[in-house]
Image (cartoon, helix red, strand yellow):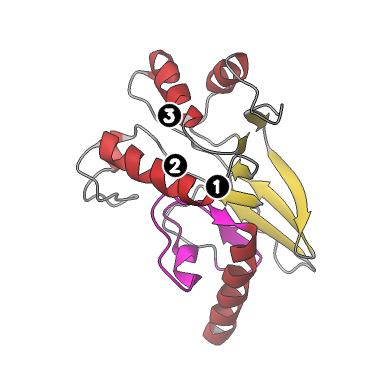
Amino acid sequence: MKFFTSDTHYFHQDLLGDNDFAPRPFKDIMTMHEVMIKNWNAVVKETDTVYHLGDIAMHPDYEAGYPEILALLMRLNGHIIFIKGNHDHRTLFKFLAQNNSNMNNGQRKFDFADVGIIVKFNHHQYYLTHYPLLLGVTKNIRNLHGHVHHYSVPIKENINVGVDAPELDFLPSKQPFGMPISENQIDTIAEKKAALLEKMM
């Protein structure tokens, strides 16, 4: 199974509490981490692949915090493919690559992409990027992205898969915070977003 997420911002203290950018209702960073790890592992199995579309973490100690970031990421189930976000430094990717490990099936735990990846499933082609691509009207092509947090691009082909994305409201039940979106949920989000935008026109 394929899963998608973005903008986890682990260790980002400034997002806690009431703020205008991307408020997170947790009393401290450790509580946020434990909730996000639990919700990730509730749906992702070791044999699954999660595409993380950028902004993994913002540790206050920068490079000195890389071992802590690695320790957290190793607690997450599945094979994780990271696409670089604007807050992801190449030095972090290099550190994770140097400390990569093999999973039980022999696959590497982490893989990396600098700009984006194209995948196909559910009769669609998906451009996976951190920034929204603003594709406009296309046939069977969608852009899964992050970056804009609790904002939504008013184009039906653009789907925000971030942990605090408004597109999560299109799912029939509330998505627990930090739980990646499955490939089976993407069509539901896309159809409901398209219907809403058409109604607004």
Seen in the picture, residue 60 relative to 120 is either above or below; the reply is above
Q: CA distance from mark 1 to mark 3?
A: 15 Å
Residue occupied by mark 1:
44
- Dot 2: element: loop
Tell me which numbered mark, 1 or 2, is placed earlier along the sequence.
Answer: 2
Q: Which label lies toward us, 1 or 3?
A: 1
- Dot 1: element: loop
Badge number at residue 157 = none
Please, what is the three-letter code of the amino acid marked with disc 2? Answer: Thr
Locate the C terminus by quadrant. Answer: bottom right
Please, what is the three-letter code of the amino acid marked with disc 1? Answer: Val
Residue occupied by mark 3:
72
Q: CA distance from mark 1 to mark 2?
A: 16 Å
Query: Residue 137: x, y in percent?
Result: 73, 69
- Dot 3: element: helix
The magenta span reads 154-182
Query: Which residue is the extreme one toward the front?
Result: 104
| Residue at the image point whose x is 55% and y is 68% from the top | 154
Badge number at residue 8 = 2
Whether residue 131 appears in this view of the structure is yes
